[in-house]
Image: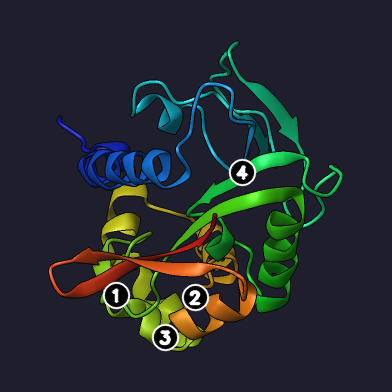
Amino acid sequence: MFKITLDQVYRPFFMFFRTRRMKSFKEIFRVTKTTKILDVGGTYFVWTLVPDLPIPIIVNVSYPENDNKQTTWIVADGRRLLFADRSFDIVFSNSVIEHLGTFENQLLFAKECRRVGGRYYVQTPNRWFFIEPHFLTPFIHYLPKRFQRKLLKWTVWAMITNPSEERIEAVIEEIRLLDEHEFRILFPDAQILKEKVLWFTKSLIAVRT
C-alpha cells in the first residue's frame, strides 16, 4: 500500500524556496569560499543547493542522523552561543527562531545572532501568511491554542504523521510565529526583507550587511 511521507509533501516547497533563498543570500553578502559562516539550527543539505557556497560551522541541539564529514557540527543552544563577539563574518539561520516557544527565548536567540556575527541573515515564516507552514494548513495559527489542540489532528501534518497527544502538545508549545513588528523589535539594526508569494508576504528575513 502506497504511503506518502511528510518529506515528499515538503520537498517541492523546500527545494524551491530554500534554493531561491540561498541564491539571494550568496548575492547579498557576496559570499566566497573563504567567508566564515555560522549556521544556527541548520542542516548541511541547504548549503549544497547553490554552487560554490562554503560549508559553515553548524550549531544544533543534537547531532544529525546522517552526519556529513565536510561539516563541523556543534551541539549547543542558540540562545547561549559559546563564541566570542564577532567570531564569524556572517551568522545564518533559516526557519529556526519560530521554534523557541516564547518571545523571551526568541529575544535571546536574536541577541546571540547579532552578537556573534559581524553580519547576519535570519529568516522566519510570517505569522500573517494565511497558510501555517509547519502544518500546511490555512488559518489554524490564528486560533487560540485551546482550539488548535482540537483541530491539529485534521491538518495535513497530522494526517501524514499521525502524532501522539504528547507530540501535538509539544509542537503547539514549541511554535511561535512572528509578525513584522515583533521581528523588527528582535532585529532593530537590520533591514527586513519580505519573501513574497503572489501579493502575500510568506517569510521575513532580517539582514545586516
Q: Between marks 2 and 3, how big is the CA–CA gap?
A: 19 Å
- Identify the residue under disc 1: 129
- Identify the residue under disc 4: 90
Closest to the observer, 27 or 175:
27
- Identify the residue under disc 2: 178
Work out whether 142 lies above or below 10. Answer: below
- Identify the residue under disc 3: 147
- The crowding category of the residue bearing disc 1, from other C-alpha atoms within 10 Å (few below 14, some 14 to 19, many at least 20), is some
- The crowding category of the residue bearing disc 4, from other C-alpha atoms within 10 Å (few below 14, some 14 to 19, many at least 20), is many
Work out whether 76 lies above or below 63. Answer: below
The image quadrant that residue 12 belongs to is top left
- Relative image position of residue 14 (x, y in whole percent): 30, 43
Q: Which residue does the image show at 63% across and 69% down from the upper left?
A: 101
Q: Secondary structure at mark 2?
A: loop
The total number of labels drawn is: 4
Proximity of marks 3 and 1: CB atoms separated by less than 8 Å: no
Give left or right: position of 165 versus 105.
left
Give left or right: position of 167 versus 73.
left
Work out whether 138 lies above or below 119. Answer: below
Single out the mark in the foreground, 1 or 4.
4
Dot 3 or dot 4: first in sequence order is: 4
Q: Secondary structure at mark 3?
A: helix
- Relative image position of residue 64 (x, y in whole percent): 59, 28
- The crowding category of the residue bearing disc 3, from other C-alpha atoms within 10 Å (few below 14, some 14 to 19, many at least 20), is few
Work out whether 193 lies above or below 1. Answer: below
Single out the mark in the foreground, 4 or 2.
4
Q: Which residue does the image show at 26% across and 38% down from the upper left?
A: 15
